Image: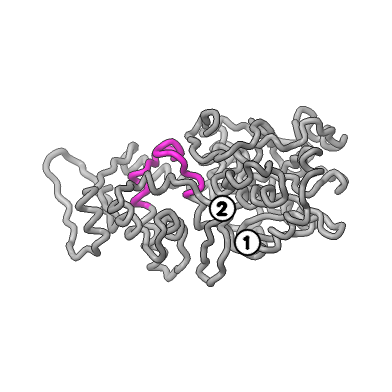
Amino acid sequence: MIGYVGAFDLITYEFTGDHSSQWEGGWPIEEYYDIQNNGLRIFRFPDAATGTSEEVFETMMLFFGALIGAYVPSWTAEDNLKFLADHMGVVMQERTIQRVDIPKTEFKSGDFLGVIRLDGLDPMLAWAMGAHTGHTTITWWIDNELYVMESTISSNYWPTNGVQKTPYDQWIKQAEAANYNVVHLPLSPDIATKMNITAGLEFFKSVEGLPYGFHNQFTGWIDTPEDNYPPPLHSAAVMLLASYAEWILAREGKTYDYLAQTLNKRLGTTGLSINQAYMTAGQRGLSFIDLITMPEQDEWIFEDANGVSGPSMVCDVFVTRMWKASGVFDASIVNLIQATEFTNWDAYSLSIFDSNYVRPKQCVEADPDSQFCQLLGKYRMALPDYNSFAPYPHMREHCPSEPPKYIKPTGC
């Protein structure tokens, strides 16, 4: 692949020798700036055209079965299990008991529900993050009724879009129909006691109905120059791919952006396209890596295509914002923790959960050797590093997440 921020060519060379590729002029100033300062980038596919095509097909098949209906076919689940085992070393054993009902009194406001659906998307997200979940939610009591709160998107298996609350019984029914694997992590009693439940609920009311946080999903994950990208991705390729994606969305008539606004936030500008943001950053002496690795800020407000404004929150960011709003983090550091820098792993590895929780007997019967109660799922979940790290200022702002070991330095 040969390209710059405005275009690319996919070329196969069968023989050695001199070759040429033509590019028409008349470039916008931001594209001309890129060519002048960065030149044409040349990428070689490691497995050539045939091998790459096969790998693309195999990846598509991880998603295909779940796209044709609300139910995840067994063959799709098996493909995803193999993907997790091959690329993360994660083995999910089949369970005999696949639904565990526990009294609602076992749940507190602020408890964590971790989810993985073997549909291609969740395993791919888990692989990128180094997490063993692909989705996260939080439980909350409102007027003596238990709800599950989350940030998600509507789909062929989920009826509601954006930041939402669903009565627990309804949520479990939907989750079971969607083939969710779900674990329950109760908060520490000390933390649960000190929480300001009213403040947490007020925060939820202020963001309920906001769209899922696509705007900063990518930048909240990328903390390092190269050590967050699953191979064979790297920053030079991602810089161009982001620009091409914006172009494709524009051609499809999509006004929604997933990266331009957050780049503008970093530069203190408004209305710049991705390529214009690249140029402005370069003129200020900032590289793409400098720009993309700046920590996200929870206070940033984004505008969706339909004009709705508010914070941009993916699933674990929303959960962590709920914890922040309700006083889970100490007042001395709460404003120094950016939830938008968290991933699923960062959320469930916080040492805020009940390490002395006595599981109900039905949880023990279903999963005798587990640390926690798995409520749903055909396959047993494990969460390495669960409940391990005390919160600290600027937590998880500069962490690598490179597979398959996902080694994170202390204090990153």
In the displayed structure, 13 sits above or below 174; it is above
Q: What stretch is highlighted in magenta?
A: 219-241
The quarter of the displayed image where residue 91 is located: top right
Residue drawn at the location 48% of the way across and 50% of the way down: 218
Q: Position of residue 45 (x, y in %)?
A: 32, 41
Residue at label 1?
162
**Residue nearest the viewer, comparing 354 with 130:** 354
Residue drawn at the location 70% of the way across and 59% of the way down: 204
Tell me the tag on residue 298: 2
Residue 382 in sight: no
Q: Where is residue 208 in the image (x, y as percent from the top left)?
A: 67, 63
SS for dot 2: loop
In the displayed structure, 309 sits above or below 16; it is below
Q: Is 28 placed left or right of 81 in the picture? A: left
Distance CA(mark 2)–CA(mark 1)? 17 Å
Residue drawn at the location 56% of the way across and 49% of the way down: 340
Categorize mark 1 by other alpha carbons within 10 Å: few (<14), some (14-19), many (20+).
Answer: many
Q: Position of residue 269 (x, y in %)?
A: 40, 61
Residue drawn at the location 42% of the way across and 68% of the way down: 252
Residue 128 in sight: yes
Q: Is 39 placed left or right of 262 in the picture? A: left
